[in-house]
Amino acid sequence: MNVSQLMTKDVVTVRSDTSLKDVAALLGTHGISGLPVVRDGEVLGVVSEADILFKERGPARPPEGLLGKLRARRGDAATTKLEARTAGEAMTSPAVTISPRRRVAEAARLMIEKAVNRLPVVDNGELVGIVTRADLVRAFNRSDEEIEREIREDVVVRTFWMAPHDVTIAVTDGIVTLAGVVDTKTLAGLLPRFVHAVPGVVSVEAELTWRVDDTKREPVAAG
């Protein structure tokens, strides 16, 4: 499953000069927690509820000691957000984005690694959608039949160019069992990894054997 199959195409956006009051109103009206800041279709950053919270928190305690004073003099992200008046001043930039053609597993990895709740979807430099953690959770809630179909059609056939029934696939409550004989030992190792990345898969149990152990190197004759 690709990001394009999950993303919301009608994206609520703001300009960099949009006031934070208007940003907060949009978040509340649309029931969302963040939105992209754009200019002519280009994503400049993302402004979220967390950025608004800096205003609610109020000023931090005055810095103490020489190190604290030096940090305050240089300024930091928290101070910038606290003093922000517009989306452009409060936003997190650059935004973490993703292509609509990337796999859902890649979107999940980015959200976890970058600690973000949403990814603007960008194609050829322009915003075409947005995907959120909630979208990924909904994708995980799939029937065993849907999961099996994607494994067979997208992983077995399209990714590894195998015949549809080269591998026996059983799915029960998201637990996948793979059985059969594949061409190489490398393929037997790769197949479960790709299957595990299919949305809705809880775990993978592989009972695969192979015709050729392609991991063994032939000895080089002394010349």
Image: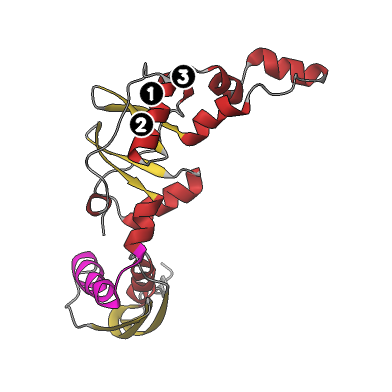
Q: Quadrant of the N terminus?
A: bottom left
Identity of the residue furthest to the left in this view: 163
Q: Which residue is pictured at 28% across the width and 43% down the height?
A: 99
The residue pinned by badge 3 equals 89
Q: Quadrant of the C terminus?
A: bottom left
**Is 68 located above or below residue 158 in the figure?**
above
Q: Which residue is pictured at 16% across the width and 78% down the height?
A: 163
Q: Position of residue 173 (x, y in %)?
A: 38, 79
Q: Nearer the viewer, mark 1 or mark 3?
A: 1
Choose between 197 and 163: the one closer to the eye. 197
Please tell me how crowded label 1 is: few (under 14), some (14-19), or many (20+) other residues with Cα within 10 Å: few
Q: Position of residue 203 (x, y in %)?
A: 43, 74
Return the disc, 3 or 2, that comes first in the chain's sequence. Answer: 2
**Is 8 located above or below residue 126 in the figure?**
below
Q: CA distance from mark 3 to mark 2?
A: 17 Å
Q: Position of residue 123 (x, y in %)?
A: 23, 38
Q: CA distance from mark 1 to mark 3?
A: 14 Å
**Type of the residue with mark 3:** Glu
Q: Give yes or no for contact between labels 2 and 1 (Cβ–Cβ under 8 Å).
A: yes
Please tell me how crowded label 2 is: few (under 14), some (14-19), or many (20+) other residues with Cα within 10 Å: some
Q: Secondary structure at mark 2?
A: helix
Q: CA distance from mark 2 to mark 1?
A: 6 Å
Q: What range of the chain is rendered magenta? A: 140-159
Q: Which residue is pictured at 46% across the width and 29% down the height?
A: 92
Give the dominant element type of the magenta stretch: helix, strand or loop: helix
**Is 41 located above or below residue 149 in the figure?**
above
Residue 26: mark in rendering: 2
Q: Secondary structure at mark 1?
A: helix
Residue 158 included in the magenta stretch of the image: yes
**Type of the residue with mark 1:** Asp
